[in-house]
Image (cartoon, helix red, strand yellow):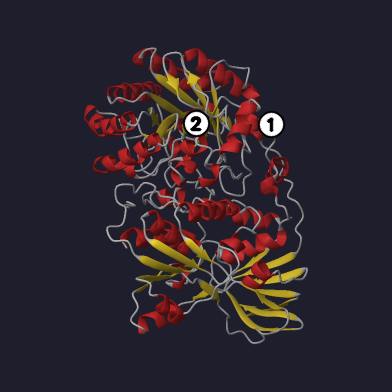
Amino acid sequence: MSDYPHLLAPLDLGFATLQNRVLMGSMHTGLEDKASDYDKLAAYFAERAHGGVGLIVTGGIAPSIRGWLKPFSGRLSMPWHVARHRKVTQAVHAEGGKVCVQILHAGRYAYHPLSVAPSRIKSPITPFTPSALSARAVESTIGDFVNSAKLAQDAGYDGVEVMGSEGYLINQFLVERTNRRDDDWGGTPEKRRRFAVEIVRRTRAAVGANFIIIYRVSMLDLVEQGQSWEQVVALAKEIEAAGATLINTGVGWHEARVPTIVTSVPRGAFTWVTRKLRGEVKVPLITTNRINMPDVAEAILARGDADMVSMARPLLADAHWVAKARAGKAASINTCIACNQACLDHVFENKRASCLVNPRACHETELTIAPAAQKKRIAVVGAGPAGLACATTLGERGHAVVLFDAAADIGGQFNMAKRIPGKEEFFETLRYFRTRLGETGVELRLATRVDATALQREGFDEIVFATGVHPRKPAIPGVDHRKVVSYYDVLASNRPVGARVALIGAGGIGFDMAEFLTQAHPSPSTDIARWSEEWGVDTGYAAPGGLAKPRPEPAERQVWLLQRTPGKPGEKLNKTTGWVHRAALKAKNVTMLAGVSYERIDDAGLHIRIGERSEVLPADSVVLCAGQESNRSDYDAALALGLKAHVIGGADVAAELDAKRAIAQGTRLAASL
């Protein structure tokens, strides 16, 4: 018997059967945009199909040039586009999978001057003001969706997903916020729904009965002037009547000021809204957002919140997620930690997506993990993220690997990161690596400090130093005062801090420390009700958009977050998560100051200067978050002894703590040895 009977049960759609209840949700990777990248895209999807996903949905593909997300992005509107898409469908079908293409019209979210929308209202997140569609252009745009669906059918797709949520064009038609029309396509809720319903109705007429049509309903807009619950229900019923096979859940517009997918959002935080629609329609419902482990998905389905679960990033993190669940090996799943650093942040930077915990994602044809031609005995020194990735990849390839660490447990800097409120998912990464060490036969020697001479005596063929970093101690008068501690002292050694704390350094570590010192423990990220109240999500859905007044919990301390450079603190944080950290700390009344000069630390506190103004922050504690320095002396000593040595992670480059670079560097080095 399976541990996950609901999750792994087939789903009969009438004309087709899905092998389980897992949908690989749509996520742009950057490979959709060039015909020359479709072999890579096909390999990426094929690996997920091989891993057992019930149904795959591609990243958003535009039905026209005006619908582009950005110039020359993915499009399926001409017959000659079909050939590249056949590579995807053939690769997925060869692995026994099913795949739908998502048809997405960006509307006013487009990053190009040809953008269009129901009304001429600029988006707050894009630089271009859209042109308002004429009535004739509305009809033409509906035709673009239908044409794209027909071409998808020609390309061998099993169906399409019509993207009606997240604030893209169809969603823009549905609400007064972005639709000020007074013709047949606006003015009343019924007329505003017509655009969406006609797309589905005409698509069904064009593709016939035996073709999957998923419609992604924005069930919770999370913006002012969003849809009411009654309007969501009415839309779902009309979409069902128009011919949809499945209804997927969309949560939040991209301009919403409520986080929906970052790691501080509780697991399954929005499945309640899908459950609320159960019984209103008969077609199967798909729920989504922050579902990353089989037990979470099984519980959601078992209590009847939905008929399927959608996961995108978890299948970037582990292509074999479903197969491992089916085999009863959930501990072997490389869990998505919802950091967004290598997936969404890459896409917004016009780079190819990947995954912090799985650098092979979207690089399957380039980063191959093949058996080693010559088996070696290799030492890896340091069991942080870089060392763990390197050691387990080397072990997978058949090398004899010994992993050393002076600490009593694996994890390195992750053991501090997992203590930050909202970053509890880092526990999962360490569980994965702990399991992986056993699976790959790595010999683990903890609480063992080694130097280059000791490693030389053991006669290793090669040595990899992943010895990490130590906190940088800035040259500030009084930096050795009793009230001064480093972030390492607080997180790794549990050094106490006072009620008033000044943080020197406003990079990622400074922001993490500010959250650690102001958030309650355990944090709201482990409690949906507390988190929803803190961010202003109305789970009773009394107001349009599902918004309520945010009620943040009071801060545990008074905190000043300081940076030397001018400009907004946190400006260099990751695009998709930085605003969340800034908003969270603002809600905790953290004082953020930039352009600060540090004059001295004494019994009175931290003396600072900003421009011509001097002041004393009456801090009980001063926490140093001012960067790191590499621990590379053992690597240098190994080179001096003539040993064949490599250095990775923070020991190589002591920038902001960067697990993405560390894991990728460790994996790539191991793949090459």
User: What mark, if any, has residue 279 been given in the picture?
Assistant: none
Q: Give x and y (percent) for residue 303.
A: 66, 27
Question: CA separation, marks 2 and 1?
Answer: 31 Å
Residue farthest along the left direction in this orientation: 80
108 and 479: which one is in front? 479
Location of residue 306 with respect to 628 vertically, above or below = above
* Quadrant of the drawing holding the C terminus: bottom left
Q: In which quarter of the view is residue 41 placed?
A: top left
482 and 462: which one is in front? 462
User: What mark, if any, has residue 22 been given in the picture?
Assistant: 2
Q: Give x and y (percent) for residue 219.
A: 58, 29
Q: Is residue 194 left or right of residue 536?
A: left
Indicate which disc, 2 or 1, sits on the residue closer to the N terminus. Answer: 2
* Quadrant of the drawing holding the N terminus: top right
Q: Give x and y (percent) for residue 364.
A: 33, 47
Crowd class of label 1 (few under 14; some 14 to 19; many from 20; radius 10 Å): some
Q: Which residue is mark 1?
A: 543
Q: Residue at x 53, y 24 (%)?
A: 9
Q: Is residue 611 visible?
A: no
Q: Residue at x 42, y 72 (%)?
A: 652
Residue farthest along the bottom direction in this orientation: 477
Location of residue 132 with respect to 135 vertically, above or below = below
Instruction: Check disc 2 and report its element: helix, strand or loop.
Output: strand
Disc 2 + disc 1, Cβ < 8 Å: no
Q: Give x and y (percent) for residue 655.
A: 47, 70
Q: Is residue 569 left or right of residue 201?
A: right
Q: Residue at x 53, y 72 (%)?
A: 565
Q: In which quarter of the view is residue 393 placed?
A: bottom left
Instruction: Check disc 1 and report its element: helix, strand or loop.
Output: loop
Q: Is residue 54 visible?
A: yes
